Image: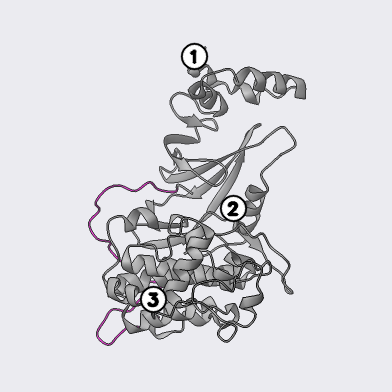
């Protein structure tokens, strides 16, 4: 059996459930590369949807599906196609995919990835996104953003995207460099991968504990709080901003307790005086070591582009008490986002040329 037989997607034959089940069983005995070819309704020449899109390359694996770079044949533009498999069993269609589609339909903002359309096949959906050159993680492998104006503009764009989300009652819940995409030509940063995002209501309900990649997870979630809101995104943004400035993750723990201790070593072990009720949280232990606040000394030394105003922004984002963290809108009013005398402004219409590329990016690997 040759993988090229997949030019007609056999798994998409339709028919009754028994035929589909039989075909899935047969596929389980095939080599992995053949299974992948049969699962993707893409012709050998990369055409998809009757030649409407030309698949150029696989970009990566997202939260719940593969992502491809494709060229639309009628306009020559590049797009990122996220393929989401539809399971014909009890799992059904991934809830994260439904959530992402419904939330992105509400989002029309220059700092949020744009969902152009959703295309359907019998066994999969394809989400068609605008294409970006790379994600922030790839960019930071070249080095930190040492230019103050570049750093300030980039951080501002991230806060602007989050401010739009929060003003529309959307929690992202997975802010990290991998989920910030970069349009390098226009130097536009865009929040992406809303697979863990959700709408929130007032009063707040109990949400999932396992949200936000560990290094960017707010301490209230690490310590077991079940009712959380927009301040968790603000904490994550502070972590991302610090990483932009230094090129290094601020709290790179290899477990929840290791991450908690890295936070405490930098910001001091919290008490009821600075964070009312912290000592009664489910996962707080009185036996935790008592560290003192370093006032972000390491970040000051490694991220000179921040300056005093940037450190002030981070300190506010890293307030232990969630209610004391600024909203994204209030954060954008802080001195860090306003030009120093004689420096270029950093409004949304300012486009930056990034440093010379050290290598190509991976694009929308969301």
Instruction: Tell me the CA gap for discs 3 and 2.
Output: 29 Å
Specify the segment rendered in magenta.
337-364
What residue is disc 2 on?
Answer: 195
**61 versus 183 height, above or below:** above
Location of residue 314 (image quadrant)? bottom left
Relative placement, left or right, of 250 versus 35 is left
The residue at 26%/71% (across/down) is 147
Q: Position of residue 205 (x, y in %)?
A: 73, 67
Dot 1, how many residues are within 10 Å of its Cα: few (below 14), some (14-19), or many (20+)? few
Q: Residues within 10 Å of mark 2 (few under 14, many from 20)?
A: many
Residue toward you, 30 or 193: 30
Q: Nearer the viewer, residue 350 or 253?
A: 253
Q: Residue furthest top?
A: 1
Element under label 1?
A: loop
x and y percentages locating residue 276 in the rendered image: 62, 83
The spot of residue 62 in percent (x, y) is: 51, 45
Q: Report how many numbered discs are placed on residues in the image.
A: 3
Of mark 3 and mark 2, the one earlier in the sequence is: 2
Q: Is residue 112 above or below residue 122?
A: below
Question: In the picture provided, is 122 more to the left or to the right than 116?
Answer: right
* Rendering coords of residue 53 (x, y %): 48, 36
Magenta-colored stretch includes residue 208: no
> Mark 1 — residue?
2
**Disc 3 to disc 1: CB gap under 8 Å:** no
Circle 3 sits in a helix, a strand or a loop, which is it? loop
């Amino acid at each position: 059996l040759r993988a090229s037989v997949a030019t007609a997607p056999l798994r998409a034959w339709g028919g009754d459930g028994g035929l589909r089940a039989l075909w899935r069983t047969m596929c389980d005995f095939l080599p992995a590369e053949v299974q992948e070819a049969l699962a993707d309704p893409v012709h050998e020449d990369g055409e998809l949807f009757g030649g409407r899109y030309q698949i150029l390359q696989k970009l990566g694996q997202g939260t719940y599906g593969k992502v491809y770079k494709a060229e639309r044949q009628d306009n020559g533009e590049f797009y990122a196609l996220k393929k989401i498999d539809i399971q014909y069993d009890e799992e059904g269609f991934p809830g994260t995919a439904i959530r992402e589609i419904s939330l992105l339909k509400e989002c029309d903002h220059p700092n949020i990835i744009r969902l152009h359309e959703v295309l359907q096949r019998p066994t999969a959906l394809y989400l068609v996104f605008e294409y970006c050159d790379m994600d922030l993680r790839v960019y930071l492998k070249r080095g930190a953003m040492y230019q103050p104006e570049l750093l300030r503009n980039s951080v501002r764009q991230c806060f602007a995207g989050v401010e739009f989300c929060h003003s529309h009652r959307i929690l992202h819940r997975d802010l990290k460099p991998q989920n910030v995409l970069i349009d390098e030509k226009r130097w536009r940063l865009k929040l992406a991968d809303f697979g863990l995002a959700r709408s929130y209501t007032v009063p707040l309900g109990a949400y999932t504990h396992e949200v936000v990649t560990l290094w960017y997870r707010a301490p209230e979630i690490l310590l077991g709080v079940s009712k959380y809101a927009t301040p968790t995104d603000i904490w994550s943004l502070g972590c991302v901003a610090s990483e932009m400035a230094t090129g290094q993750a601020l709290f790179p723990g290899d477990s929840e307790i290791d991450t908690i201790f890295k936070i405490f070593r930098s910001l001091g072990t919290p008490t009821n005086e600075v964070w009312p009720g912290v000592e009664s949280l489910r996962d707080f232990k009185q036996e935790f070591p008592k560290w003192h606040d370093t006032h972000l000394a390491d970040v000051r030394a490694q991220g000179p582009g921040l300056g005093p105003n940037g450190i002030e922004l981070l300190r506010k984002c890293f307030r232990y008490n969630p209610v004391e963290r600024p909203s994204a809108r209030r954060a954008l009013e802080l001195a860090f986002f306003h030009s120093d005398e004689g420096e270029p402004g950093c409004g949304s219409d300012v486009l930056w040329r990034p440093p010379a590329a050290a290598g190509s990016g991976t694009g929308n690997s969301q």
